[in-house]
Image (cartoon, rainbow, N blue to C red):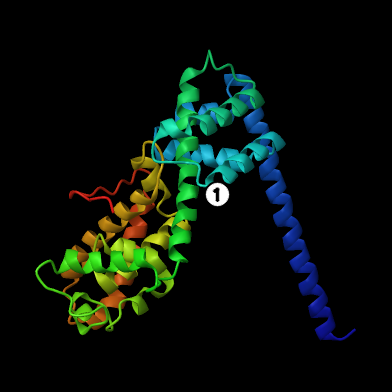
């Protein structure tokens, strides 16, 4: 056997050994976690969900840990419940008000109480806390679906609703100036790159236009992209769980976008750019700043201006 074959066999053995050690370590951690949870249940008389609900502060701390506990549950009944709630979110059955979601939420909480052998009469506060957490968790998931639906809906100049929103944008930004034509160089005055704004929406679709009804052209479309990425990868979750009492909806996203727009304006001025060509670098630095702030479990972005509904 030559040296190369020997080295290759050693590498294979070494890699397999590392995988085995990693797998063993992961199994050991899971075993330890199960033992700890079992002991805590015996000592406190409370399941993990109850310990989180009673021990964590309301908002992101409680909701994110409840979410983690449900997602990691090995109970087939809990997994069926998660599938039921996922379907409800995919079908758009969560709304901005708690009252309209009572049937979904109460069914979910009742299932948890039965699975975990918890008496509602004894643990009324747990019921209330779990209701709020489920509402926040699955309305957030529904919001992601709604955002993706808007983002993938391309601007269509043959769609009268799309066209009306575009003209409304012009009138909002230039109330004292008539638009000479639907396709006009005037659009460049409010930040679009060409004579026809529809070409600028690209990957953000009609979502970019809806956000612009709150704010301002190409910078706005870039911030729409930033905002939806922060929602997709879960970075905005702590903020949502801390600020939305009855769950999130599309208005929640628009307000988040407005916050980013106002903060970016301040950040841009503080960076003192030489010209507009520095936009990309400054935008990246701004995103890093926002991501750091969003990583705080207690984060809450608050607008100090009124935002009208579309």
- Residue at 50 percent of width and 39 percent of height: 65
119 relative to 50, above or below:
above
- Is 33 rendered above or below residue 4? above
Q: Residue furthest right?
A: 1
Residue 287 appears in the rendering: no
SS for dot 1: helix
Q: With 45 as the anchor, is 75 left or right in this view?
A: right
Tell me the residue at 50%/49% (across/down). 141
Q: Nearer the viewer, residue 142 or 137?
A: 142
Quadrant of residue 285 within the rendered picture: bottom left
Q: How many marks?
A: 1
Lateral position of residue 106 relative to residue 263, left or right:
right
Residue 77: which quarter of the image?
A: top right
Relative to 148, does residue 131 appear above or below in the rendering? above
In the image: residue 180, left or right of residue 110: left
Task: Name the residue beneath numbered marker 1.
Answer: 90
């Amino acid at each position: 056997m030559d040296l190369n074959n020997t080295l290759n066999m050693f590498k294979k053995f070494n890699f397999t050994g590392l995988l085995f050690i990693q797998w063993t370590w992961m199994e050991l951690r899971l075993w330890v976690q199960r033992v700890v949870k079992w002991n805590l249940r015996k000592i406190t008389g409370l399941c993990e969900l109850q310990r989180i609900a009673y021990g964590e502060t309301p908002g992101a701390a409680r909701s994110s840990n409840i979410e983690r506990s449900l997602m990691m549950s090995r109970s087939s009944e809990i997994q069926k419940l998660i599938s039921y709630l996922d379907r409800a979110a995919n079908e758009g059955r969560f709304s901005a008000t708690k009252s309209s979601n009572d049937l979904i939420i109460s069914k979910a909480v009742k299932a948890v109480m039965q699975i975990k052998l918890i008496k509602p009469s004894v643990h009324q506060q747990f019921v209330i806390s779990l209701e709020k957490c489920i509402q926040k968790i699955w309305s957030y998931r529904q919001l992601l679906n709604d955002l993706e639906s808007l983002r993938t809906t391309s601007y269509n100049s043959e769609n009268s609703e799309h066209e009306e929103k575009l003209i409304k944008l012009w009138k909002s930004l230039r109330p004292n100036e008539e638009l000479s034509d639907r396709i006009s160089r005037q659009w460049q005055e409010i930040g679009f790159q060409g004579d026809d704004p529809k070409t600028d929406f690209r990957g953000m679709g009609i979502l970019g236009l809806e956000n612009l009804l709150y704010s301002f052209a190409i910078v706005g479309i870039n911030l729409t992209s930033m905002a939806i990425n922060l929602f997709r990868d879960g970075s905005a979750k702590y903020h949502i769980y801390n600020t939305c009492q009855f769950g999130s909806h599309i208005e929640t996203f628009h307000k988040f976008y407005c916050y980013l727009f106002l903060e970016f304006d301040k950040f841009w001025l503080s960076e003192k750019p030489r010209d507009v060509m520095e936009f990309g670098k400054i935008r990246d630095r701004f995103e890093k700043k926002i991501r750091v702030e969003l990583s705080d479990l207690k984060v809450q972005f608050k607008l100090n201006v009124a935002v009208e509904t579309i």
